[in-house]
């Protein structure tokens, strides 16, 4: 379906939990309260929403969180989503800690592509960012996923205060493995407001200095706004996602659903439509249920604003933490 600015909306990110095993300082600080389980959409409800979304033209789904792999049965949900008519691809975003543990189940359920968030290759820096000592488990997850032939993207957020100089180490992953290493600019959402991110334009300058033979890579790597580069001798590519210093709202193709069923038209604004209310106010057999679901999904797409306003902080109306939105 097209939104009111003519953009085709065919991608939905679905957060399946607001819980997480890590405490990344810019996302989920210690002590944050979580939503009661009964307020989260059940898997059955998630599948119902996605089935309706597919009828409106959503073709790609990303399962995210919180940490999706801490919700029991997450691999089987991926299997269910993959079976929805019209859904062409289902991918997962994870912090990687439990990836090795669930890899076989994920593969059995048809997962072929995974995004792994990792901000450093230094164990101490990892501990200081995430509050946990699980670095080696993430590395094992990356190796296991690559070994199983999965398409792997590694997402890194560079913060002036914590890991600004970690990019050369992260790039080594793209040298050694056929993975895309992507640098994502921090956005002023939730705890992210307290941090200054490294600008990708500055980063690209540094990359070009270190790797003068780096070239733009025009192949399509996915369905997002990343720009890619190749470096001779590297098995993988390097990507940048520059929400702050390279606004790409004119190509935005997505909506987001939170774990409790709020569909957000844009990351920047707090407004959302409530699919849980629809699902829980109509009986399953009620013919109006589908129609009502369709109407709220359409509303979310129609209400997509033309652009985010991250550069004007006073206009940002989203007050939730990223962990409950899903990134
Ligand atoms: N737990 C999973 C993970 O870490 O991949 C999925 C959820 S997490 C919210 C998704 C992504 O959002 C992570 O890559 C994280 O680094 C990123 N993220 C969190 N807060 C952010 C912010 N304020 N700006 C940009 N990215 C952010
Ligand atoms: Fe958890 Fe992912 Fe947020 Fe880190 S970025 S706290 S792993 S949800």
Image (cartoon, rainbow, N blue to C red):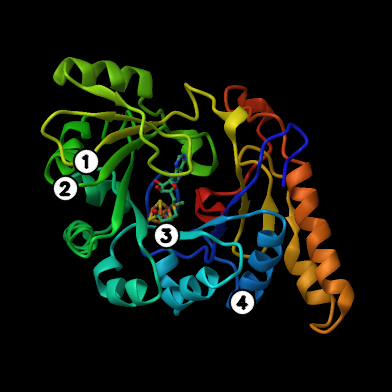
Does ligand 1 reach within 8 Å of label 4's beta carbon?
no
Cα–Cα span, label 3 and label 4: 18 Å
Residue identified by numbered label 3: 92
Q: Residue at x 29, y 28 (%)?
A: 229
Instruction: Kindly report the distance in space between the C-alpha atoms of the residues bearing marks 2 and 1.
Output: 6 Å
Nearer-N-terminus badge (3/1): 3
User: Is residue 40 among the parts visible in the rendering?
Assistant: no
Mark before the other along the chain sequence, 2 or 1: 2
Q: Position of residue 299 (x, y in %)?
A: 80, 50
**Horizontal and vertical percent position of residue 306:** 70, 29
Q: Is residue 47 above or below residue 315?
A: below
| Spot occupied by residue 257 in the image (x, y as percentages of width and height) | 62, 57
Q: Earlier in the sequence, mark 3 or mark 4?
A: 4
Q: Is mark 1 within 8 Å of ligand 1?
A: no
**91 left or right of 237?**
right
Please tell me the numbered disc located at residue 42.
4
Q: Looking at this view, is 275 or 47 the one in front? A: 47
Q: Looking at the image, tell me whether mark 4 or mark 1 is earlier in sequence order.
A: 4
Helix or strand or loop: what does disc 4 sit on? loop
Whether residue 96 sits left or right of residue 49 in the image: it is left
């Amino acid at each position: 379906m097209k939104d009111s600015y003519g953009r085709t909306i065919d991608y939905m990110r679905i957060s399946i939990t607001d819980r997480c095993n890590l405490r990344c300082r810019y996302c989920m600080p210690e002590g944050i309260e979580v939503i009661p389980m009964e307020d989260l959409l059940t898997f059955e409800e998630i599948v119902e929403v996605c089935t309706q979304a597919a009828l409106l033209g959503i073709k790609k789904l990303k399962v995210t969180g919180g940490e999706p792999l801490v919700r029991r049965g997450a691999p089987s949900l991926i299997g269910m989503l993959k079976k929805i008519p019209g859904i062409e691809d289902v991918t997962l975003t994870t912090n990687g800690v439990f990836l090795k543990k669930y890899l076989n189940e994920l593969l059995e359920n048809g997962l072929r592509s995974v995004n792994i968030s990792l901000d450093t290759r230094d164990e101490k820096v990892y501990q200081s960012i995430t509050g946990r000592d699980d670095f080696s488990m993430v590395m094992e997850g990356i190796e296991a996923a690559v070994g199983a032939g999965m398409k792997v993207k590694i997402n890194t957020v560079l913060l002036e205060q914590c890991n600004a100089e970690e990019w050369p180490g992260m790039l080594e992953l793209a040298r050694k493995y056929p993975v895309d290493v992507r640098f994502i600019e921090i956005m002023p959402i939730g705890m992210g407001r307290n941090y200054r991110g490294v600008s990708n334009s500055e980063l690209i300058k540094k990359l070009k200095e270190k790797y003068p033979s780096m070239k733009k890579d025009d192949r399509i790597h996915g369905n997002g706004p990343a720009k890619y580069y190749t470096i001779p001798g590297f098995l993988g590519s390097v990507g940048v996602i520059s929400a702050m210093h390279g606004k790409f709202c004119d190509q935005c193709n997505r909506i987001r659903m939170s774990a409790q069923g709020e569909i957000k038209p844009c990351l920047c604004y707090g407004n959302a439509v409530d699919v849980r209310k629809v699902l829980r106010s109509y009986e399953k057999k009620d013919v109006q249920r589908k129609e009502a679901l369709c109407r709220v999904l359409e509303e979310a797409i129609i209400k997509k604003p033309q652009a985010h306003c991250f550069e004007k902080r006073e206009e940002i109306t989203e007050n939730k933490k990223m962990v409950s939105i899903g990134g």
